[in-house]
Amino acid sequence: MKYVIVLCDGMADEPLEELGGKTPLQVAETPNMDLLAPKSEIGMVRTVPREMSPGSDTANLSVIGYDPREYYTGRSPLEALSIGVDMEPSDVAFRCNIVTLTEDQDTYEDRIVIDHSSDEISTEDAAVLIEALKEGLSREGYEFHVGTSYRHLLIQKAGKVVELTAPHDILTKRIGDYLPEDPVLGEMMRKSYEILSVHPLNVERKKNGRNPANSAWFWGAGTRPALTSFEEKYGKRGAMISAVDLLKGIAVGAEMHNIFVPGANGGLHTNYAGKAKAAVEALTEEGYDFAYIHVEAPDEMGHQGNTGDKIKAIENIDTYIIGPVAEMLEAAGESFRMMILPDHPTPVRIRTHTKEPVPYLLYDSRKVVGKMPEYHEGTASKTGIREEEGYRLIARLFEQE
């Protein structure tokens, strides 16, 4: 038996007036999900504990089977694991986004976050800017590390975890009310704008109609995590397919195998087909029992407030991942159980995460168990199947309840 989770980051949403009172998942053309739905268990799951913030960190830990109340020590330390940063117990990691701020205000505090991803800046361009920050913001006890796209890392030696605001939570808002209270972090962010706003790479980006990546933004502080081995916990050899450092870091901490897929970039135009192929090869040729296919695109489109592209992202997952994975596993003669779900909602109306329960679909190639004709938020809420503790859902997948 093989097991697959297709994690559609931020796919869940609200009914939208522009869609006739339907959600993007309801409107999207998803023939492969529609084929699986009547044969599958469909229900709702609370992936984010009520008392915790609705991040992809806490939510994905839950989906992979780790209670975030027990295992979560911050988002950035998980990303540090993914890029090979060896943290000391006293170190604190911070996510360092390269963001776009407005430039027509007189003071840094009056600027507004208009893009948390700087037009989904490439890793190559971002690395140039991080090097500029390393040089211009150099100070003892602080280290910058290049990550992926707009997502990078700052390590503070012998640091302290402080409350910070994620930039995607304050899009279109004045930043002065959300800057760090820590004077060093605040000073570094202000100076980062002075460095990056005039950097030749950003001058060129603006000439080409791209958003300038003109400021560092620190958030997601935490200390080194300690996850137990996934194989030891669930008796399954697991593989992770993701373009996002957070998910790669969870995999490192859980001693799962990270699979690199060329062209996988966390955006709308990621290599969906490559992810599907890599997952099936891991399961059928490399001896893995479980594949976790993480796709960031719906979340990014939700943060951008782009309804049409969010629908397109969902359709791409259906066309290039869900259908092919099922077909390839069937062609290989493998019995399999596949779960499809988001980690959390990212409603396009508010452009940030919420902690409402999300719909899941659980398909078993050996049997028909469902009654619902379609899979989306509406049908899932009507089945009466509900899991309040998200970290328990994986036991349902593995039939270990």
Image: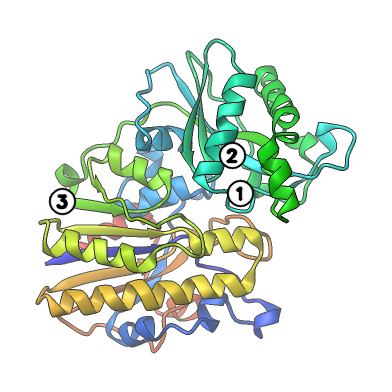
Identity of the amino acid at label 3?
Arg
Identity of the amino acid at label 1?
Ser
Is 109 or 361 nearer to us in this picture? 109
Q: Position of residue 6 (x, y in %)?
A: 34, 65
Is 33 or 384 nearer to us in this picture? 33
Contact between labelled residues 2 and 1, with CB atoms less than 8 Å apart: yes
The residue that disc 1 covers is 117
Please tell me the numbered disc located at residue 237: 3
Relative to residue 140, is residue 336 drawn left or right? left
Q: Position of residue 84 (x, y in %)?
A: 34, 31
**In this view, 167 is above or below 286:** above
Q: CA distance from mark 2 to mark 3?
A: 33 Å
Q: Quadrant of residue 202?
A: top right
Q: Quadrant of residue 255?
A: top left
What residue sits 50% from the left and 70% below the top? Answer: 313
What residue sits 86% from the left and 32% below the top? Answer: 107
Disc 2 versus disc 3: nearer the observer = 2
Going by the picture, which residue comes out furthest to the top? Answer: 140
Q: Position of residue 96 (x, y in %)?
A: 56, 34
**Number of numbered markers:** 3
The residue that disc 2 covers is 97
